[in-house]
Amino acid sequence: MSIKDLNKKLKNETYSSLYLLYGKEKYILEYTQKMIVHAVLEEATADFNLSAFDMEEQSIDTAIEDAETLPFMGERRVVIIQNPYFLTGAKTKSKVEHDLKRLESYLKDPSEQAIVIFVAPYEKLDERKKIVKTLKKQAEVIVADKMNVRLQKDWIEHAAKEANVTISNEAAERLIQLQGENLALLISEVKKMALYVGEGEQIDPQTVDELISRSLESNVFTMVEHVANRRIDSALRICYDLLKQNEEPIKLMALLSRQFRIILQVKQLRAQGHTEKNIASTLSLHPYAVKIAAKQSASFQEDELKALLMKAADADFEMKTGQRDKTLTLELFLTSLARQPQTN
């Protein structure tokens, strides 16, 4: 079931007695859980009828007993079952005993006055287990997979809409480029920018550049972008800012080398006729990172990139062997790129 379909059902007060939320995208798990809780429970009695049980610390029997307890001053109870590791094949250090036969019995005949939400932050469940098959059959299932660019944009636009602003497609792409794949951080940035632009206004790429909390990787990415466009002074300014933040020159060199290596790989694979989607899969990269690397690759010849990587390897060796001051070596590497001939 999609989040959109679930939202429609909740608005129509069509509730299920059982929900299974699983996947590695933490933000979606938390968002969906809150959405169900807010739809089901009245604010005045929520504290009395909401409980959560961590299966690594408490038994499933305790959670079931709570689910079978009548709600207090309300129509329903909500019971959240966190970390149900027994749905996976993973080993755990937990010594808690779980009566899965009792759970299976409850799943087949759940209380009509309770809504039980299983929140499983795991990429996969063990489909061979009888308890997993029963739960999937009886419950409404939401899978919180890691997201592709299209879905990330959908969530970004949804967050903007909830904040009564809009965000341009270019701004959403820029946000993903600079912030990365963490959906919670992306949504947090949208909310911050919404407060800045004000209700009814639009978040544009300039707003993203001005306000985003940049990660180390995004700063390095921007450095490479400046290098690709031969704005070495701008690349050096970012470099100096990072050094003031006590970032290690060897680490910065490694990240720069990695990005140039990606640009070379993308350039080579595109020349062989591969699509950006295939390249992303082959290199295990985010599709938008491939898109930008493809754009940057137009500023370099293949031989130029190979020479650049050799130069980066030499600089890395000099740093690690103490042949030259690490900061000076990094500066010389960046300034040398200004003399690289730009591809037309």
Image (tube, rainbow, N blue to C red):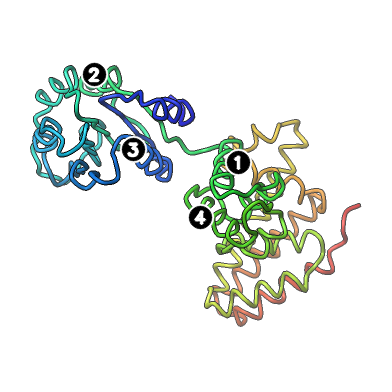
* Gap between marks 4 and 3 measured at Cα: 23 Å
Q: Label 3's element?
A: loop
Decide: marks 3, 2 in contact (CB < 8 A)? Answer: no
Which amino acid type corresponds to the residue marked 2 in the rendered image? Thr
Which amino acid type corresponds to the residue marked 4 in the rendered image? Ser
Residue 224 image position (x, y, % from top left): 70, 60
Q: Label 4's element?
A: helix
Depicted 33 relative to depicted 326: above or below: above
Q: Residue 94 vs residue 42: left or right?
A: left
Residue 223 image position (x, y, % from top left): 69, 64
Disc assigned to residue 134: 2
Depicted 311 relative to depicted 145: above or below: below
Residue 319 image position (x, y, % from top left): 58, 74
Q: Quadrant of the N terminus?
A: top left
The residue indicated by pointer 3 is 122
Mark sitting earlier along the chain (4/3) = 3
The residue indicated by pointer 1 is 153
Quarter of image, res 157? top right
* Gap between marks 1 and 4 measured at Cα: 14 Å
Foreground mark, 1 or 3, reads 1
Which amino acid type corresponds to the residue marked 1 in the rendered image? Lys
Decide: marks 2, 4 in contact (CB < 8 A)? Answer: no
Q: Residues within 10 Å of mark 1 (few under 14, many from 20)?
A: many
The residue indicated by pointer 4 is 188
Q: Please tell me which residue is depicted at 73% across the width and 41% down the height of the picture.
A: 268
